[in-house]
Structures are given as C-alpha cells and as structure tokens.
Image (cartoon, grey):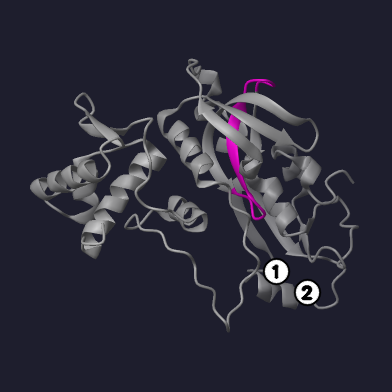
Amino acid sequence: MDDLTHAQRQRLAFIDFSLQYFGQVSRQDMITKFATGLAAATRDFQLYKTLAPDNMQLVHQTKSYHRLNSFKPLFTHQPESILHGLAKGFGDGLSHPVQPSEVCIDALQLIHPDTAVIAALMRAIQDKKAVEITYVSVSSGEKLRQVIPHALINNGQRWHVRAFDRANSIFSDFVATRIKSISLSPTVVEASECCDSDRFWHQDVQLILVPHPSLKHPEAIELDYQMQDKQLVLTCRAALAGYLLRQWSVDCSAKHQIGSGVCQLALANHQVLKLIENLSIVPGAKY
C-alpha cells in the first residue's frame, strides 16, 4: 500500500468504501467517478483483489463486484467524514479526521455511531433488506428487534435510522448509537414495510416561523434567520418537522405562551401540527 500513488489509493479506497457501505461496486462506477477507462478500472479491481482477496467476488449477472462476508476494510474510515460523505455525496473514498481550528471554534459535534453499524444499515437500505438489531431504548431497555431501514438522518442532536418496526407495525426512528449489534435477516420484506409506504416520510409540510411575540426587538431574530416580510417559511418532511422545531426551540403553543426566555421563535401556522409526527418532542405542542 505504501508504494501506491495517491491517485491509486483514491480509487482503491472508493472500491473499499462502496463494498463496505453499499455492498457492491462495478467498473462502470469507477469509470463514472474517476473518468478513467475500462482497462484502467479493470487493473484497479485486480490490484484490490490482490491486496484483499477475501473482500469481494464478481457476480456476472449484475456485472458488479459484491461484498463477501469475510470482508475486512483496507482503509480506516472516520465516522464523521463517512456520515458527511454519505449525506453530501462521497468524494474520493479517502476519509480523514477533521482538524479543528484554533481561531474558529465550532459547536460540539454529534456522537457518531460505530462505522460497522453505519455500513450494515447502509447495505440494508441499498438492498431493501430487513435487519435484526439489539437495541436499547430509554423506555423499554434492551430488546431484539426486526426492522427494515430506509434512511439515515442527522436530526441536529444525533444520528437515527428511519425504519419499519415489525414489533409495532409502524415506521419509527431508532437512535443509531443505541444499536449494540446488527445482522441481516433472511425474511422477505413486504411492500407495506418499504419506504414507499412511509406516509409521514413522503408528506411535506410548510412551517411558518416568526420572532417570538414577547421579544422587545424582533428585528434581531429576523436578521438571525434572514427572514423575509418578518417570517421564515420552511418546507420539510412531516417525519422530521418535530426534530427541527425542537432543535430551534420554536414555541408551538396556540397562544405562544412559553416565553422568549426559552424560545425566540414561534410557529405562526399552528394548524400544521396536525400533520407532523413526534409531537411529544415539539415545544408547547400540547398547549
């Protein structure tokens, strides 16, 4: 590995990443990603196979190399870089630790789930498969669950996976860091358990946010959020709206009675709460 050029390492890391997080990769993927030729892509796969003979096998039906159960990654991927890459579109396959600045200090970062858990979830999402997870919840403790995941989401506080929960026959959110173990389930996934059946996921809602009416100088908040005509109009998924309203501390009570000491924003279109999920986490939704 030390004798390889940076460009070679980039291409091998892309193969490694694709196998680990998507379960397969093809020569066409390499050609599209790196604008290389067919012969060059073939050489890259041959080199990867030499370095990691137990990581993949060619499946002629799909014309792709598929991940083997004996897979062991050639490259160490940092959770923060990987999750950012999955959300924004992965670059060259090489992930590097983020170097903090001494003069520009960001907020404390999210606690990231284990990369093996992320990889297993991503492969299940890619292949539309069910998984068995050992999951620890605040309310019921540790339980073995069967879920069908379809998305990984950063809700502003932590990463969670959106999945169909077979135990309760509903789509729900599972905090990724609370997954102690994960394995593929051989069971058949029904249409009602797939993403297309997740009503709250596919329903968009419009949130109209205004400065909290108790504020003496609301223009400050208008500037913070670049409001137009003294309001900010956002569109988001109904399944995620509750997280946004909690993260931004939006007063969603009917008469905006929480107070600016806690909330500097208020929800102007209170009726939209009837359309969103997870009302229990929304500030003032019960008032």
Q: Which residues are magenta?
A: 154-169
Q: Nearer the viewer, residue 46 or 165?
A: 46
Q: Position of residue 256 (x, y in %)?
A: 86, 57
The answer to whether residue 203 is seen in the rendering is no
Pair 1/2: label in front? 2
> Relative to residue 68, is residue 228 depicted above or below?
below
State the residue position of label 2.
218
Question: What whole-number distance in Å separates the C-alpha atoms at marks 1 and 2?
Answer: 9 Å
Neighbourhood count class around disc 2 (C-alpha, 10 Å): few under 14, some 14–19, many 20 upward: some
Cβ–Cβ under 8 Å for marks 1 and 2: yes
Q: Nearer the viewer, residue 24 or 284?
A: 24
The answer to whether residue 122 is seen in the rendering is yes
Residue type, numbered disc 2? Pro
Q: Position of residue 204 (x, y in %)?
A: 59, 42
Q: Residue at x 31, y 52 (%)?
A: 13
Neighbourhood count class around disc 1 (C-alpha, 10 Å): few under 14, some 14–19, many 20 upward: some
Residue type, numbered disc 1? Lys
Left or right of 203: which side holds 256?
Answer: right
Q: Residue at x 87, y 43 (%)?
A: 286
Q: Residue at x 58, y 47 (%)?
A: 113
Q: Quadrant of the N terminus?
A: bottom left
Residue 208, disc: none
State the residue position of label 1.
230
Q: State the SS at label 1.
A: loop
